[in-house]
Image (cartoon, rainbow, N blue to C red):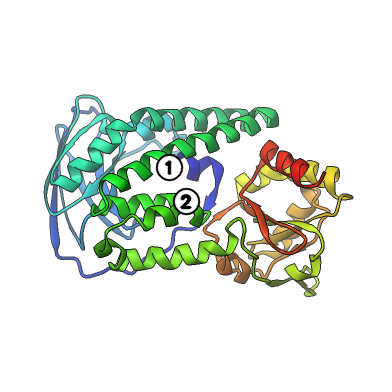
């Protein structure tokens, strides 16, 4: 959740819901609260949801799902104070990620949902065990996210750049834990989720494919497995070492600009939008990098996922973007974004003079360091 809130603006795709015939009963035993709370169980990116009331710290939620799947359970005030500010600490305390599976699941805690003990089927228990084993990594991610947000509010770019590097290193540790789980549990439905997490919103096929190939044949050929394989193939289009397929987008005057028109230069393809906070937060870094390297056979090709032309052009002016900008004003349906499977922004990749991808998804100091390396 932290990376979605602070590091990226994301598209949650709607997945077709299969026939749901497996009954799940979730029983909870939490502390008694003085305020009235509702309990919300959601899955399939929020396309499936059930609600219940929390009474004397107890609740029961019943759902029907097509099979084992990741879900979130949360408690929310039934009558919140109007205009109440978002409280991240309260949010974390009142939310829990778990796996749903057929049968009864019990959730027990003396403090809050985030510290609850979860018991159920083997799949439910395995995921809970994994969460406990990686709890320190989750806590570290939350701490980095809090610091990033605070320094971002203070507009301390040096601190946020350092924290972004820390976050990227943290993600490598998470990926290592996920890879270990998949190796040890190639037939577990949780392993499919691990592959999906490795692929991420930046479609990192280099991380996801090795994990996918470790899955049992049954999982690889399942409906979800086939879906992930298709996504991995799309992700390969922006994988380091491949030649990026050409594409064209109209500029503000309707003139088409193609990636191939920059052949012979190093090009940073930057997917962004005026409404994306993390994109705008990255603007000073992009401007700094462009001013430093624009005369060294380097160009930026901005691709906007805006739908409103005026807001797009205002952001270009306000953030002092002086490089080529294009966009078909179709939002997440932008043709180039769909071609590369872009599900989260900012997203970027660098191609060399021959159009081969040499780096992807770099920000802040990491971007400058890579440009220093390749533009000697």
Q: Quadrant of residue 147?
A: top right
User: Relative to residue 59, is residue 255 drawn left or right?
Assistant: right
Could you classify mark 1 by the number of other residues whose Cα lies within 10 Å: few (under 14), some (14-19), or many (20 or more)? some
Q: Secondary structure at mark 2?
A: helix
Closer to us: 69 or 329 = 69
Where does residue 198 sit, x and y in percent of width and height? Answer: 43, 50
Q: Secondary structure at mark 1?
A: helix
Q: Which residue is mark 2?
A: 207
Quadrant that contains the C terminus:
top right
Is residue 16 shown above or below 29? below
**Which residue is at the far left?**
103
Q: Quadrant of residue 53?
A: top left
Where does residue 69 sit, x and y in percent of width and height? Answer: 26, 54
Closer to us: 304 or 199 = 199
User: Relative to residue 127, is residue 8 drawn left or right?
Assistant: right
Return the mark for residue 56.
none
User: Relative to residue 164, is residue 55 drawn left or right?
Assistant: left
Where does residue 161 sit, x and y in percent of width and height? Answer: 65, 33
Report if residue 258 is visible in the image. no
Report if residue 187 is visible in the image. yes
Where does residue 169 sit, x and y in percent of width and height? Answer: 53, 35
Distance of mark 1 from mark 2, alpha carbons?
A: 8 Å
Number of marks drawn: 2
Q: Which residue is mark 1?
A: 175
Q: Residue at x 49, y 42 (%)?
A: 3
Residue contact at pointers 1 and 2, CB within 8 angstroms: yes
Quadrant that contains the N terminus:
top left
Could you classify mark 2 by the number of other residues whose Cα lies within 10 Å: few (under 14), some (14-19), or many (20 or more)? many
Q: Which badge, 1 or 2, is on the more N-terminal residue? A: 1
């Amino acid at each position: 959740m932290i990376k979605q809130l602070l590091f990226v603006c994301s598209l949650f795709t709607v997945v077709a819901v299969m026939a749901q015939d497996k009954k799940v009963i979730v029983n909870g035993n939490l502390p008694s609260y003085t305020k009235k709370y509702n309990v919300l169980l959601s899955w399939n990116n929020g396309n499936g949801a059930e609600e219940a009331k929390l009474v004397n710290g107890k609740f029961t939620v019943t759902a029907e799902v097509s099979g084992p799947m990741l879900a979130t359970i949360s408690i929310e005030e039934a009558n919140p104070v109007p205009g109440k500010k978002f409280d991240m600490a309260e949010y974390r305390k009142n939310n829990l990620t778990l796996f749903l599976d057929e049968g009864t699941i019990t959730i027990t805690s003396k403090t809050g949902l985030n510290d609850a003990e979860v018991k159920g089927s083997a799949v439910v228990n395995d995921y809970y065990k994994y969460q406990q084993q990686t709890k320190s990594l989750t806590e570290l991610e939350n701490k980095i996210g809090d610091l990033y947000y605070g320094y971002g509010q203070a507009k301390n770019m040096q601190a946020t750049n350092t924290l972004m590097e820390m976050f990227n290193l943290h993600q490598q540790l998470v990926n290592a834990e996920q890879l270990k789980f998949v190796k040890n549990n190639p037939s577990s439905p949780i392993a499919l989720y691990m592959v999906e997490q490795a692929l991420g919103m930046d479609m990192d096929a280099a991380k996801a494919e090795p994990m996918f190939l470790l899955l049992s044949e049954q999982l690889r050929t399942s409906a979800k497995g086939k879906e992930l394989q298709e996504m991995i193939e799309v992700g390969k289009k922006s994988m380091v070492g491949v030649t990026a397929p050409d594409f064209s987008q109209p500029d503000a005057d309707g003139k088409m600009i193609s990636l191939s028109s920059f052949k012979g230069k190093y090009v940073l393809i930057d997917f962004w939008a005026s409404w994306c906070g993390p994109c705008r937060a990255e603007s000073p870094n992009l401007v700094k990098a462009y001013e430093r390297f624009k005369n060294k056979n380097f160009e930026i090709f901005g691709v906007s996922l805006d739908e409103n032309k005026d807001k797009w052009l205002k952001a270009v002016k306000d953030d002092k973007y002086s490089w080529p900008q294009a966009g078909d004003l179709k939002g997440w349906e932008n043709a180039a974004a769909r071609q590369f499977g872009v599900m989260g922004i900012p997203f970027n990749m660098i191609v060399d003079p021959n159009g081969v991808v040499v780096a992807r998804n770099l920000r802040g100091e990491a971007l400058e360091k890579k440009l220093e390396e390749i533009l000697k």
